[in-house]
Amino acid sequence: MRIAVPDLVSNSYFPAVAADALGYYRAEGVDVSVVHISPVESCVAALRDGAVDFIGASAHAPLLAFPEWRGVKLICAQSQGMYWFLVMRHALRLARGELDGIKGCRIAAVPFTAAALQRVLAAAGIDVRQDRIDIVVPESAKRPGVNFGVAAAEALAKGEIDGFFANGMGAEIAVTRGAGDIVLDIRRGDGPAECFNYTMPVVATTDRLIAANPQAAAAVVRAITRTQRQLRTDAEAAARAGAQLFPPYEAGLISAVVARDLPFYTPAISFSFVAAMTSFAWSIGLSQTAPASYQNVVATQFAHLWDA
């Protein structure tokens, strides 16, 4: 079986990939390998078309290929809260939450996260068009197989962009190299509070797999929850997994990035989250229903495993 992630060199979907590196899929009796399929639209299409069995992606991403949640379910969270960071050029000297300073700037984001960025900024009273904010994709990030966050951090260092909205690994690289500063970290209270539940990293699969092989879906949930527990209690686990998964420089950073995320590494998907996330999806045009019903989005038969 295969689980696809749209972003591999990152902490975004680290529990799903670390579960393979740390041996938890095998321990739960399923043979699951991780594949990188990017962009996210292609990743979700691969799930729809049966090329992969699970995806580790944003909670609202399945709507890209499964209209109104038909044929797909979320089975657990990888971590809680919106996990993309707004990082701006260090020379701008912007403080956390200082959004007036991004007006007139050139900010990198892939189309999927750009929609989220525009919604976050709108909730904060920033109009992208009126405030002349240019959201772009750097040429360096368009190459096949390139990790967007890493490429965006490099583009920021070269002065090609003024900022980017991307994953924690990209943010860590930009900050540690002195190229950028974090202006928005939604998880830690920056920006409007409502944005926290716009999305989060999850694992999803199809209704057909759940019907045909519920034991495999349950095993994946157990593997993710065991991985989250080990990451929370074993400081070296992230380093061991990162050494197997990432290039040397990014592998050296992953422990610190994961350590900051540990409070969010829990598997539950709450009713309040689904209400907020599906309303957000409606607001950016991914759905015609807001909010969607919890049972329509979440495979509730696996919920008891979140507390196991």
Image (cartoon, rainbow, N blue to C red):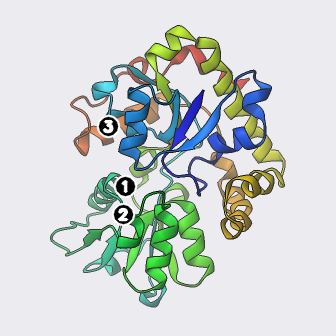
Residue 295's x, y, as percent?
Answer: 42, 17
Residue 215's x, y, as percent?
Answer: 64, 13
**What SS does tag 3 mark?**
helix
**What SS does tag 2 mark?**
loop
In front: 217, or 82?
217
Residue 128, picture quadrant? bottom left
Query: Which quadrant is the C terminus positioned in?
Result: top right
Among numbered discs 1 and 3, the one appearing first in the sequence: 3
With respect to residue 62, does 283 lie above or below?
below
Checking the image for residue 109, the label placed there is 2
Residue 276's x, y, as percent?
Answer: 38, 38
Q: Specify whether 244 is left or right of 250.
A: right
With respect to residue 308, does 301 lie above or below?
above
Disc 2 to disc 1: CB gap under 8 Å: yes
Q: CA distance from mark 2 to mark 3?
A: 17 Å
At 38% from the left edge and 32% from the top edge, which residue is drawn? 275
Q: Specify whether 44 is left or right of 123.
A: right
Checking the image for residue 113, the label placed there is 1
Disc 2 to disc 3: CB gap under 8 Å: no
| Residue under label 3 | 64
Q: Specify whether 89 is left or right of 187.
A: left
**What SS does tag 1 mark?**
helix
With respect to residue 106, does 293 lie above or below?
above
Q: Specify whether 46 is left or right of 261.
A: left
Disc 1 to disc 3: CB gap under 8 Å: no
Q: Amino acid at mark 3?
A: Leu
Q: CA distance from mark 1 to mark 3?
A: 13 Å
Q: Amino acid at mark 2?
A: Ala
